[in-house]
Amino acid sequence: MFLGMFVLIFTTLPAVIVIFIGLLPTITVVITDPKNTTKLIVIGCFNMSGVFFCIMSIIDQFNLREAFFIVGNIFNLVIMLGSAALGAILYYELPNIFIALSKLSAQKRLKAIDSKLEKLALDWGQDTIDSQKK
């Protein structure tokens, strides 16, 4: 089993180098927070999309020189690691966005209810509404 894994890593070494360097944020999440699978899925999927973009360029020239060129290029690193950062931002900020949207929706509903209550007060009189509150 170990021999087969060693042969597989050795024959695909350029891709393994790019994948290992590119997936460092996902590996970090696996090590630091192994029980939080939703965080791993979000950051890992975004990270894989960035790494996949760089892996596609190594397929044309499958050698170590090209792998180190991809890993050494700052723009490729920004793509690979920045996509994981976008996943982390999405993971941490999406709940806050939903909270803000639900507060906004609740405020709109409250204004609509208040306007209906004012209309009822005009139609039926304030005495009727005050007697219902007791």
Image (cartoon, rainbow, N blue to C red):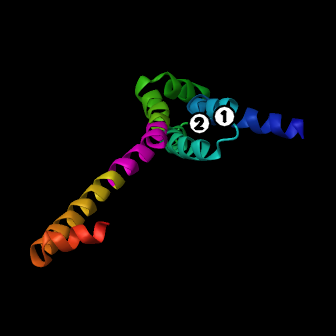
Which residue type does callout 1 highlight? Answer: Asp
**Residue at the image position 52 percent from the left and 43 percent from the top:** 52
Q: Is residue 107 above or below residue 73?
A: below
**Residue at the image position 60 percent from the left and 29 percent from the top:** 24
Q: Is residue 95 magenta?
A: yes
Label 1 or label 2, whichever comes before in sequence order: 1
Magenta span = 86-101
**Residue 28 image point, x, y percent:** 63, 29
- CA gap between label 1 and label 2 equals 34 Å
Q: Which mark is residue 99?
A: none
Which residue ends up furthest to the left in the rendered image?
A: 122
**Residue 118 image point, x, y percent:** 14, 67
- Magenta portion: prevailing SS class: helix
Report the front residue among 54 and 49: 49
In the image, taking residue 123 as reference, residue 112 lies left or right, namely right
Which residue type does callout 2 highlight? Answer: Phe
Residue behind mark 2: 62
Q: Is residue 56 magenta?
A: no
Residue behind mark 1: 33
- Near mark 2 (Cα within 10 A), the count class, few <14, some 14-19 or many ≥20, is some
Looking at the rendered structure, the secondary structure element under dot 2 is: loop
Looking at the rendered structure, the secondary structure element under dot 1 is: loop
In the image, taking residue 97 as reference, residue 53 lies left or right, namely right
